[in-house]
């Protein structure tokens, strides 16, 4: 056989192998591989609580430090189990073979700085599987000067998109290595706080911290410790080279309700539990349900 013909056959075989490989479901990120999406060994207690079709909505009295002064406001933590599409990384309308269950956290803060208001919202989608990191994290901050938006998608690396009205930030699209996310620590604490990593490790700080402090988005050296005192579990995340410490106080028994948290930088931001309820809030959007805000002490 002539050398040219041999080369042609070799190239064709390589192309055919590539096509077969790309069509293999194991290479499709929308297919749940056993390695990434094997479900955690969740207890019946956990399933009975979180798989009941309701969310936990908890309001907190907030003292937020901003521009060197304490600002009174409110915070809300909303935890809910829902189906999620890992490829497109959005909530699924219905559970299917292509979805995974996630613990979702929607986290809001509202406070005023003088004449103008701040509104912060972050969302975390953590799979209830052996996949070690959240599949998606978003954060948005609005105030009268403008708004910023930051999004992480968990793919081969953490893919980050950032949009900001500040000079020097503007529109960015970059990747960082995978490390523990401070944002996902909240959902891990609600699934099983005794399983979170402790000791010295690298942690990617809270997304709102990056936006409020205009720090580079990367992992920083940190220490995580836990202390149990009677019925309360305290988790302490302390960064080594930036001025930030997070302290989360929660019930030490299931369902591990978050009682209070503190964000310590130069000063201390603190949120203390006010009211909590389990409710399918998305079905309560008519005016007749507005009284439920009073049940949560929300204005």
Image (tube, grey):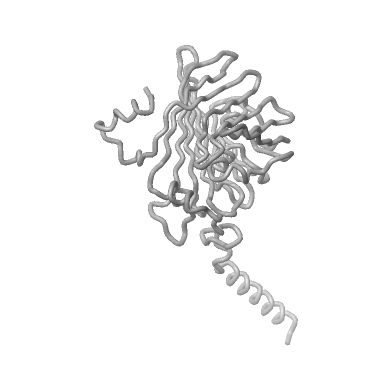
Residue sitting nearer the eye, 231 or 110: 231
Left or right: 83 with respect to 195? left
**Along the line of sight, which residue is nearer the eye, 29 or 79?**
79
Residue 89 at least partly seen: yes
Q: On screen, 194 above or below 107?
A: below
The residue sitting at the front extreme is 230
Give the residue displayed 42% in from the left and 52% down from the top: 92
Q: Position of residue 197 (x, y in %)?
A: 67, 43
Q: Horizontal and vertical percent for residue 46?
A: 48, 49
User: Considering only vertical position in the picture, is 268 above or below 97?
Assistant: above
- Rendering coords of residue 114 (x, y %): 48, 12
Q: Quadrant of the N terminus?
A: bottom right
Residue at the spot x=26%, y=35% of the render? Answer: 286
Residue reaching furthest to the left: 288
Locate the C terminus by quadrant: top left
* Location of residue 207 (image quadrant): top right
Taking depth in this image into account, of 145 and 112 the one nearest to the observer is 112
Residue at 49% over, 46% down:
103
Q: Residue at x 56, y 69 (%)?
A: 24
Is 22 on the left or on the right of 50, as rendered? right
Q: Is residue 119 visible?
A: no
Is 244 on the left-hand or right-hand side of 65? right
Q: Position of residue 236 (x, y in %)?
A: 65, 32
């Amino acid at each position: 056989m002539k050398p040219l013909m041999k080369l042609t056959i070799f190239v064709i075989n390589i192309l055919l192998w590539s096509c077969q490989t790309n069509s293999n479901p194991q290479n499709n990120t929308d297919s749940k591989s056993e390695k990434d999406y094997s479900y955690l060994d969740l207890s019946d207690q956990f399933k009975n609580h979180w798989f009941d079709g309701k969310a936990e909505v908890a309001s907190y009295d907030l003292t937020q430090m901003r521009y060197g002064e304490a600002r009174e406001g409110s915070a809300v933590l909303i935890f809910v189990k829902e189906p999620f599409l890992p490829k497109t990384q959005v909530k699924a309308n219905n559970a299917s073979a292509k979805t995974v269950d996630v613990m979702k956290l929607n986290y809001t803060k509202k406070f005023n700085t003088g004449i103008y208001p701040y509104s912060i919202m972050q969302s975390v989608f953590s799979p209830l599987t052996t996949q070690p990191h959240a599949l998606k994290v978003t954060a948005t901050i609005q105030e009268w000067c403008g708004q910023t938006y930051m999004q992480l998608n968990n793919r081969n690396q953490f893919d980050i998109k950032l949009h900001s009205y500040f000079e020097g930030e503007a529109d960015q699209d970059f990747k960082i290595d995978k490390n523990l996310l401070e944002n996902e620590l909240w959902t891990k604490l609600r699934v099983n706080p005794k399983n979170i990593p402790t000791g010295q490790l690298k942690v990617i700080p809270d997304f709102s911290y990056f936006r409020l402090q205009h720090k580079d988005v990367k992992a920083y050296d940190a220490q995580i410790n836990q202390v149990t005192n009677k019925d309360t579990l305290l988790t302490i995340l302390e960064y080594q080279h930036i001025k930030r410490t997070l302290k989360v106080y929660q019930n030490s028994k299931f369902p591990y309700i978050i009682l209070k948290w503190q964000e310590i930088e130069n000063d201390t931001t603190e949120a203390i539990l006010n009211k909590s309820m389990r409710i399918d809030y998305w079905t309560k959007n008519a005016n007749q349900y507005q009284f439920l805000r009073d049940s949560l002490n929300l204005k």
